Image: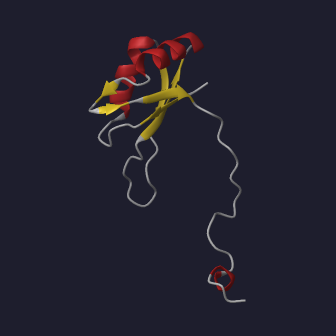
Amino acid sequence: MSIYVGNLSYDVTEADLTSIFAEYGSVKRVQLPTDRETGRMRGFGFVEMSAESEESAAIDALDGAEWMGRDLKVNKAKPREDRGGAGGGRRNNNFSRGRY
């Protein structure tokens, strides 16, 4: 299982996140997604720990805690939904502008 960590400072590093979660157990992996265009961190991340009991302890302790000037949102990550390959956006601009 993975832990979702939201409302992160844009300055946080994988080492920062590893050190804060290591207080609750063994951290297996940290992932900080970045924006494709800017390369800037997106303000959330994922942490995997060795045992579910460690994850639960970290969630209980860190959810709502202030860290690096922000109140963290920490909970079990939900499985990623398949959003399909078509992407969003308008498919028929004439229709969306009211031209039939």
Up the image or down, 70 lies above or below 92; here it is above
Side (left or right) of 59 relative to 79: left
Of the pair 99 and 48, the residue shown nearer to us = 99
Quadrant of the frame with the N terminus? top right
Nearer to us in this view, 28 or 70:
70
- Horizontal and vertical percent for residue 9? 32, 39
Q: Quadrant of residue 32?
A: top left
Q: Residue furthest bottom?
A: 99
x and y percent of residue 56 in the render? 54, 15
User: How many marks on residues?
Assistant: 0
Identity of the residue drawn at 64% across and 82% down: 93
Q: Quadrant of the C terminus?
A: bottom right
Asked if 88 appears above or below 94 in the picture, the reply is above
Rendering coords of residue 37 (x, y %): 43, 61
| Colour treatment of the image | secondary structure
Q: Is residue 77 left or right of residue 6?
A: right
Query: Which residue sits furthest front?
Result: 98
- Could you say where residue 73 lies in the image, as x and y percent from the top left? 45, 30
Q: Quadrant of residue 10?
A: top left
Q: Residue at x 68, y 53 (%)?
A: 83
